[in-house]
Amino acid sequence: MRVAVLAAIVVLVGGLAAAAFVLRVGGSMVDFEVYRTAGARAAAGEPLYRATDGHYQFKYFPVTAFVFVPLAAVPAAAAKATWFAVSLGALVGLVALSVRELPHRVLPVPLLVGAALLTLGKFYARELLLGQINLLFALLVVAGLMLLTRRRDGGAGVAFAAAAILKPYAVAFLPYLVGARRFRAAAACGMLLAAALAAPGLAYGAAGNVELLREWWQTVTSSTPPLLTNPDNVSIAAMYAKWIGPGAAADAVALATGVAFVAAFGVVVRLRDPAVAQPEYLEVALLLTLVVLLAPQGWDYVLLVSTPAVLLLVNALPRIGRPLQILTVACLAAVGLTTYDIMGRAAYGRFMALSITTCLYAVLVGLIVHLRMRRVA
């Protein structure tokens, strides 16, 4: 009976996903076209970073373009369908693996999954509609976390490096591994990253690869300032740029706040309690959330990578006081229920212009730090 029910659920979900792709998603996926274009350029040995691409510039490491060479070689419709299936599988894998690895799980799985979907569902949907890469990136990080907790450090380092190949954010896990004294994982991560950064030299030549890396850095840095006041940017830098205007003052306060967040993360790692099982879960979940807030181009839907952090907070509700329970639920509800359809154009626009999502996540970060200070996780 259970097998039949599971099969029916799989068929139903598969049918709904196929309908969503045909009716809505397949006609969009504008960000996926950036990856395909980069893949085609890499296959032809052409420049990857072009100002003429406007808002849809390729902003990833040169090696990332080669990941998409196979999808650039097939018709657009087939490539989109393939990428949608990969992304949907990554979504299922991200939630399932985050729940499975959750230490001290006290709440039922359906409740945890429901909480993740209610809080982050709008981000998951936006990710699939754009054809973005964040679900696969987050799944690789959580896979690295799983391997860390099983003391398979070589594999963990490879997983974190693979995540960085997809998104430069994951480079932040290399110093974390060193600070956590997981030197074998750090070595594996560093060696694979170095090899990946050098690999495009096989196609472009050593000098050409150096030029690609220079162009990548210039593209990222030059495209950042105009995006800081974009309503959908939830980074700390964007928050201050919206509040006090772009400039030196906003940059200075953003830097100070970022340093404070990094220092708080360092305290979290130092406060590890040997009696707490799988302390890596909280640390990786926190760092995965922080990278979105610290990166100047942190779009709101990228917060889907906070899936482990949301599950951690929800699972900890029975073990914290009533005031913190109310604060946690209120913040998660505010993140999940603040949508354009519910709030309306004017209210939602004001909500995003004030960077309230960033403020909510700052509170959630504080709650995660509190869990570690109280030895809850």
Image: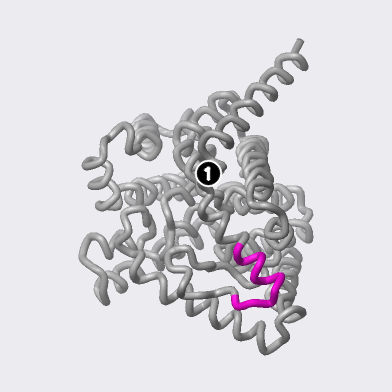
Residue at x-position 63% and y-position 85%: 210
Front position in the image: 208 or 313: 208
Residue found at x 66% / y 20%: 9
Q: Is residue 45 magenta?
A: yes
Residue depicted at x 70% and y 66%: 66
Residue of label 1: 27
Nearest the eye: 369 or 120: 120
**Element type at mark 1:** helix
Residue found at the far front of this picture: 75
Q: Position of residue 256 (x, y in %)?
A: 34, 69
Q: Is residue 95 visible?
A: yes
Q: Is residue 306 visible?
A: no
Image location of residue 28, percent across then percent down:
51, 46
User: Residue extending furthest bottom?
Assistant: 207
Q: Quadrant of residue 252?
A: bottom left
Could you tell me which quadrant the N terminus lies in? Answer: top right
